Amino acid sequence: MPSKVIIDLSGFRRNVATVLKTVPQRASGALREIAGDVSGEAKDLAPFREGHLTESIRGEVVQEQTTGKMAAVVYVPANHQAASYAVRMHEGSYNLGAGSVAKQQRVGKQVGRKFITRALDNKRDRIRKIIEFYFRRKK
């Protein structure tokens, strides 16, 4: 004689739908925090002459219109007075000036080239923790 097992998945489906609705808000919150942390670190690592470069570093969340994909972005705006200087200081080779040496001693971090890239590398563990926090199952 055949047996019949009936499983009601409606509750499971409701729970999945509820969790999926929270993903955009969780992602946005995590990305905002990541952008803030990485841009803050980049400001600490940026060379210092008059402070324009440090002030120009931005961190924000951008969302693609058609797909809805989001990303944390750390950058120096192209129209900022420090933009051309930022590229030279990020990509070029140079000796640190007196202002950068003083800043390096003040912040206790290596100031200089690749300041945005190094900020991301320095914050990898923190980024992982932020993501885990925002996507941990909340009861």
Image (cartoon, helix red, strand yellow):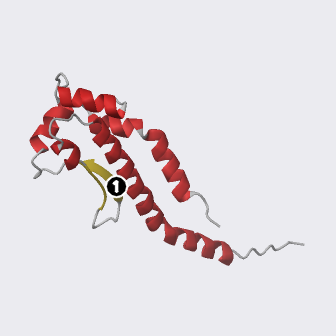
**Residue 70 in view:** yes
Which residue is tagged 1? Answer: 71
Residue 9 lies, in percent from the top left, at: 68, 74
User: Against 134, is 123 above or below?
Assistant: above
Q: Is residue 2 rendered to the left or right of residue 77?
A: right
The spot of residue 133 in percent (x, y) is 54, 54
Residue placed at 33% from the left, 33% from the top? 106
At a point 16% along the width and 44% down the height, the residue shown is 52
Foreground: 134 or 80? Answer: 80
Residue 14 relative to residue 49: left or right: right
How far across and down, in percent of the image, does residue 138 sit? 61, 64
The three-letter code of the residue at mark 1 reads Ala
Location of the N terminus (image quadrant): bottom right
Q: Position of residue 120 (x, y in %)?
A: 36, 40
Q: With respect to residue 25, does 114 lie above or below?
A: above
Classed neighbour count for the residue bearing mark 1: other residues with Cα under 10 Å, few (<14), some (14–19), many (≥20): some
